[in-house]
């Protein structure tokens, strides 16, 4: 599969998707198509290698979830993005499709408070369970005190 | 008749009850602070819950507060066993966004230190893993002391190059910070020759040891499908039959100029991962020799003497840059907003993804096998927890 073929397939299946770039190909879809895009990436585009999942806090414009997957046989890279919208913290989980998303989504919840719906075991991963707040949000100050050091 | 006030509970004891046991957080086989909550049936592991985060420093938040000139030397504190590669990933991401040229000599020096770093990192892996598994020559720390002795030679080289032995700050956006001092190339050649001879020695020690073979062969098998889905990379991925090495698949920093082979094994077990790394030792030394032969003259940075904050600004944009580290794909996803500091930085630590595979491969093994599997995964907790 070439990048052009992949682009054509995405355009055919996802009318709302914005596609740009070649290496990687960046595809942005609304959250309700997130799961379908991940399924398409894995099964149709055969991007089976899960590189990472993360998020970006765009302040007033809300959170953006970013996933990078690769097709190692054909060397096609795909960067999938979805904007959750202002104040929205719910996002469909892709852990069912990519095993690697399990830990990365837990990290996304831990750091940004994103509730990945359908995740089998959504709890904090790096921070202790009693941590208050989500440190990578832009509203979280670097010097926020935390018990027992308050 | 009224119901009895004391309720009797029948315990269904069949002699095979499950036991929950903590392995760690201070277990020596973890080579760091890591806790595995095991569910056991006798000696057999039924389930494992990996507890990480003991070394978490929130590098990603920290990076948002530091300029592009300041952060590279902090980046080395993620994967402190292969500090050069983590610095490399960060500066490459910044260079990709800023479209900053890197002089040829700097590119080759980057390759040189990355390959020496890979050898140093693999030496530490080999020594600690084999010590955990009973070592060579019937147990003990023999091979550990051997590999540490050799690793010191590389750290000596790094010390005379940058002045530090563990965390370097060698990379900067646009090039490297230090050029090789007089006589360094000759001593590097000498070290490389010495290491080349030693590696065959280790192979004889280990592969002729039936205990080592019994503990490594067929243990902790990772299938290709699982490997890709979890996103494990580096020697683990190549040990599971995937021919994927970023130095070959998407060459960077002049890797396309060098001749080397990418080892691939199909068994997917601990022994396959061991074999991949043993070949990588030699291939890395081969690349080091080629760099030393062909090191071009010229500047070592396109932005020398970078001092003020204004000079470190990088235009708006985003990039994901990845390099083939000792443990796999070390990546940095950087979002720049046009200021001197990143808007967002994400570390894709190879160890984090590699460690996530444990839950899928450990169940069904004995407790003792966890030590062999953990060692073959070669996690560095600075990079897992970031």
Image (cartoon, rainbow, N blue to C red):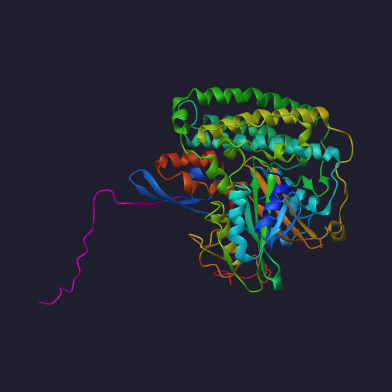
**In this picture, residue B7 sits left or right of residue B76:** left
Q: Magenta: predominant secondary structure element?
A: loop
Q: Residue furthest right?
A: B298
- Give the residues drawn in magenta, as a range: B1-23
Please determine whether, in this image, residue B153 is positioned above or below residue B57: above
Residue B15 in the magenta stretch? The answer is: yes
Please determine whether, in this image, residue B138 is positioned above or below residue A131: above
Please determine whether, in this image, residue B71 is positioned above or below residue B170: below
Please tell me which residue lies in front, B64 or A68.
A68
Q: Position of residue B382 (x, y in %)?
A: 61, 50
Specify the quadrant that holds the N terminus of chain B.
Answer: bottom left
Residue B380 in the magenta stretch? The answer is: no
Q: Report how many numbered discs are placed on residues in the image.
A: 0
Q: Position of residue B378 (x, y in %)?
A: 56, 41
Please tell me which residue lies in front, A41 or A114.
A41
Please tell me which residue lies in front, B73 or A65.
A65
Please determine whether, in this image, residue B334 is positioned above or below residue B4: above
Q: Residue furthest front?
A: A12
Please tell me in which quadrant of the rendered image residue B114 appears.
Answer: top right
Q: From this viewpoint, is residue B382 visible?
A: no
Please tell me which residue lies in front, A144 or B51.
B51
Identity of the residue drawn at 60% across and 23% down = B200
Q: From this viewpoint, is residue B206 visible?
A: yes
Q: Position of residue B179 (x, y in %)?
A: 83, 39
Q: Position of residue B62 (x, y in %)?
A: 69, 60
């Amino acid at each position: 599969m070439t990048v052009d073929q992949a682009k054509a397939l995405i355009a055919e299946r996802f009318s709302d998707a914005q596609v740009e770039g070649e290496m990687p190909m960046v595809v942005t879809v609304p959250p309700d198509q997130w799961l379908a895009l991940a399924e398409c990436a894995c099964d149709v585009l055969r991007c089976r290698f899960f590189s990472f999942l993360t998020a970006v806090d765009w302040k007033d414009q809300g959170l953006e979830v970013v996933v990078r997957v690769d097709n190692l046989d054909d060397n096609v890279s795909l960067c999938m993005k979805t904007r959750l919208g202002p104040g929205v913290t719910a996002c469909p989980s892709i852990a069912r499709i990519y095993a690697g998303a399990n830990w990365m989504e837990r990290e996304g919840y831990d750091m940004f408070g994103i509730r990945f719906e359908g995740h089998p075991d959504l709890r904090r991963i790096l921070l202790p369970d009693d941590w208050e707040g989500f440190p990578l949000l832009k509203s979280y100050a670097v010097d926020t005190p935390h018990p027992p050091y308050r | 008749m009224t119901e009895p006030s004391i309720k009797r509970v029948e315990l269904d004891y069949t002699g095979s009850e499950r036991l929950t046991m903590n392995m760690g957080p201070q277990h020596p086989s973890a080579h760091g602070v890591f806790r595995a909550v095991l569910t056991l049936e006798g000696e057999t592991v039924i389930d494992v819950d990996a507890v990480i985060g003991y070394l978490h420093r929130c590098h990603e938040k920290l990076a948002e507060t530091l300029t592009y000139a300041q952060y590279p030397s902090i980046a080395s504190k993620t994967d402190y066993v292969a500090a050069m590669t983590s610095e490399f990933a960060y500066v490459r991401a910044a260079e990709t966004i800023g479209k900053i040229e890197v002089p040829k000599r700097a590119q080759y020096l980057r390759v040189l230190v990355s390959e020496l770093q890979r050898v140093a990192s693999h030496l530490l892996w080999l020594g600690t893993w084999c010590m955990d598994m009973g070592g060579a020559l019937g147990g003990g720390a023999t091979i550990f002391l051997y590999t540490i002795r050799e690793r010191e030679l590389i750290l000596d080289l790094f010390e005379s190059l940058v002045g530090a032995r563990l965390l370097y700050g060698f990379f900067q956006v646009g090039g490297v910070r230090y050029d090789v001092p007089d006589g360094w190339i000759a001593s590097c050649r000498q070290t490389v020759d010495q290491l080349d001879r030693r590696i065959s020695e280790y192979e004889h020690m280990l592969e002729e040891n039936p205990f080592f073979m019994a503990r490594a062969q067929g243990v902790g098998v990772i299938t290709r499908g699982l490997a890709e889905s979890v996103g494990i990379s580096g020697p683990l991925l190549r040990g599971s039959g995937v021919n994927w090495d970023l130095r070959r698949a998407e060459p960077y920093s002049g890797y396309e100029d060098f001749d080397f082979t990418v080892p691939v094994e199909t068994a997917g077990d601990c022994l396959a991962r061991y074999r991949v790394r043993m070949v990588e030792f030699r291939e890395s030394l081969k690349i080091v020799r080629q760099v030393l032969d062909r090191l071009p003259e010229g500047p070592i940075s396109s932005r020398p003497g970078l001092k003020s904050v204004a000079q470190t600004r990088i235009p708006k944009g985003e990039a994901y840059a990845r390099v083939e580290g000792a443990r796999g794909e070390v990546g940095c996803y950087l979002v720049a907003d046009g200021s001197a500091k990143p808007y967002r930085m994400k570390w894709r630590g190879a160890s984090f993804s590699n460690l996530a595979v444990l839950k899928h491969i450990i169940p069904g093994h004995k407790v003792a096998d966890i030590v062999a599997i953990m060692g073959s995964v070669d996690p560095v907790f600075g990079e897992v927890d970031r």
